[in-house]
Image: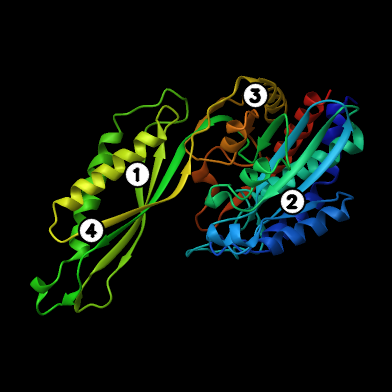
């Protein structure tokens, strides 16, 4: 048997164990918000210890965590050193959006049906805690490298931008890899992605009794006027096209809106939150300035209205670094052999933690266990799930790629 065949065989023979590991991870909730995710890190560290893998715990200071709107963040690092050479880091995040409504399965059950595992984070991205851990275990069991290092990094604030995960660890020089792979899907290796700007807009008017509406200033009517201006701009974005395969055009979404005090009261305040996706060709500073201008000009058309705008998140787009070619080549080579089809290198409209590594000059790509599209996985929707065969095969691709990268 070749080393590649030995890796495949080890993963096959331990796959039931791998699935149980993923089920255990799914069964510890990590809803973000509220973002009390240290308990999941503690549980993960215990599970890793059962495999003989010691996880360093890096708790982010409480003041930083609370300032970000979270409750607890403990990052985990497993370091495996084999000799002189490059360090390859594998990063997945455990935090997830709350389940929401419409589930037909227990979102924290890890139930298996028709070859699929169901649960929040089964596809994004507790699955790749499993992918990366068992790829590492296979490598050490049957094709242990003589050079280089592998690091597993499991973080818990990707949904809030990653600044307390990879951002905090890079800033404090706790991690300094040469190459990195982040959690992704099985049928493409992602080398570029959109940026994301999130803003909170608060529209202030003046409350009044509904029986005498002219005595107040209706913040909701003003908010609707501002929203119409933003949606009109969103229509124009369709004419701005990206040259990156897999990415189309910029777009804007209003995710939440709240305000008012009672049915019989003219609302004096309305707050909405927007999400603006930026294609790699856009300048984030210019995008934010343009949105602020649109909001201010629309608000100025309504007498008695003032507006506060607060930036919540600015995640820059991922721009591929030339040094990512060994990663792309290894994943594409073994993806073709394991999946029997070409694994294209392309962009995605999502945004990820990988941008933080690339901003630090560390080449990275996105690849892991999952379907062809986010839509297929039901990620962030009811009945999120993962095809177990994709998990098995992606684990083989990562294990084989690690062997090549550390040779």
* Label annotation for residue 154: none
Residue at point 65% right, 21% down?
323
- The secondary element bearing badge 2 is classed as strand
Please state the horizontal and vertical placement of residue 42, each as a whole percent of the image: 76, 61
Q: Left or right of 45: which side holds 275?
A: left
In which quarter of the view is residue 174 placed?
A: top right
Distance (Cα) linking label 3 and label 2? 24 Å
Density class for disc 1 (Cα within 10 Å; few <14, some 14-19, many ≥20) is some
Q: Which residue is mark 4?
A: 306
Between 236 and 397, the one lying in front of the other is 236
Closer to the N terminus: mark 3 or mark 4? 4
Labels 3 and 4 touching (C-beta < 8 A): no
- Cα–Cα span, label 3 and label 1: 30 Å
Q: Find residue 374 and report its horizontal and vertical position in percent.
A: 52, 43
User: Comparing marks 2 and 4, which lies closer to the viewer?
Assistant: 4
In the depicted structure, whether residue 292 falls above or below residue 37 = above
Residues packed near mark 4 inside 10 Å, few (<14), some (14 to 19) or many (20 plus): some
Q: Quadrant of the N terminus?
A: top right
Q: Earlier in the sequence, mark 3 or mark 2?
A: 2
Label 2, residues with CA under 10 Å away: few <14, some 14-19, many ≥20: many
Residue 76: give its label: 2
Distance CA(mark 3)–CA(mark 4):
47 Å
The secondary structure type at the circle numbered 4 is: strand
In which quadrant will I find the C terminus? top right
> What is the CA distance from the residue labelled 2 to the residue labelled 4?
45 Å
Q: Position of residue 307 (x, y in %)?
A: 26, 56
Circle 1: element type: strand
Compare marks 2 and 4 and give the one earlier in the sequence: 2
In the image, which is nearer the foreground, mark 1 or mark 2? 2
Q: Earlier in the sequence, mark 1 or mark 2?
A: 2
Q: How many marks?
A: 4
């Amino acid at each position: 048997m070749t080393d590649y065949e030995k890796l495949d065989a080890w993963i096959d023979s331990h796959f039931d164990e791998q699935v149980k590991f993923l089920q255990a991870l799914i069964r510890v909730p990590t809803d973000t918000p509220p973002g009390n995710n240290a308990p999941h890190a503690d549980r993960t560290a215990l599970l890793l210890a059962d495999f003989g893998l010691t996880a360093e715990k890096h708790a982010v200071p409480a003041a930083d965590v609370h300032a970000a709107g979270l409750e607890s963040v403990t990052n985990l690092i497993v370091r495996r050193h084999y000799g002189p050479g490059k360090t390859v880091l594998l990063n997945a995040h455990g935090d997830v959006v709350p389940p929401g409504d419409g589930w037909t399965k227990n979102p924290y059950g890890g139930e298996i049906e028709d070859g699929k595992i169901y649960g929040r984070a089964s596809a994004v991205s507790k699955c790749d805690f499993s992918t990366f851990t068992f790829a590492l275990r296979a490598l050490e069991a049957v094709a242990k490298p003589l050079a280089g290092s592998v690091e597993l990094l499991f973080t818990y604030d990707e949904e809030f931008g990653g600044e307390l995960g990879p951002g905090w660890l890079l800033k404090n020089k706790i991690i300094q890899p040469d190459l990195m792979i982040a959690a992704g899907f099985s049928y493409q290796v992602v080398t570029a992605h959109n940026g994301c700007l999130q803003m909170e807009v608060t529209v202030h008017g003046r409350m009044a009794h509904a029986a005498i509406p002219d005595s107040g200033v209706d913040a909701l009517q003003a908010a609707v006027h501002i929203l119409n201006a933003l949606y009109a701009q969103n229509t124009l974005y369709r004419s701005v096209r990206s040259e990156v395969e897999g990415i189309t055009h910029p777009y804007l979404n209003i995710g939440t809106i709240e305000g008012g005090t009672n049915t019989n009261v003219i609302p004096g305040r309305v707050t909405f939150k927007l999400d603006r996706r930026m294609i790699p060709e856009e300048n984030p500073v210019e995008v934010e300035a343009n949105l602020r201008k649109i909001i201010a000009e629309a608000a100025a058309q309504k007498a008695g209205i003032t507006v506060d705008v607060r930036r919540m998140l600015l995640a820059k787009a991922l721009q591929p670094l030339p040094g990512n070619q060994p990663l792309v080549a290894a994943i594409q080579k073994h993806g073709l052999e394991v999946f029997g089809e070409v694994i294209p290198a392309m962009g995605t409209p999502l945004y990820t933690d990988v941008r933080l590594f690339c901003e630090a000059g560390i080449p990275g790509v996105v690849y892991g266990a999952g379907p062809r599209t986010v839509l297929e996985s039901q990620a962030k929707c009811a009945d999120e799930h993962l095809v177990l065969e994709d998990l098995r095969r992606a684990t083989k691709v990562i294990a084989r790629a690690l062997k090549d990268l550390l040779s």
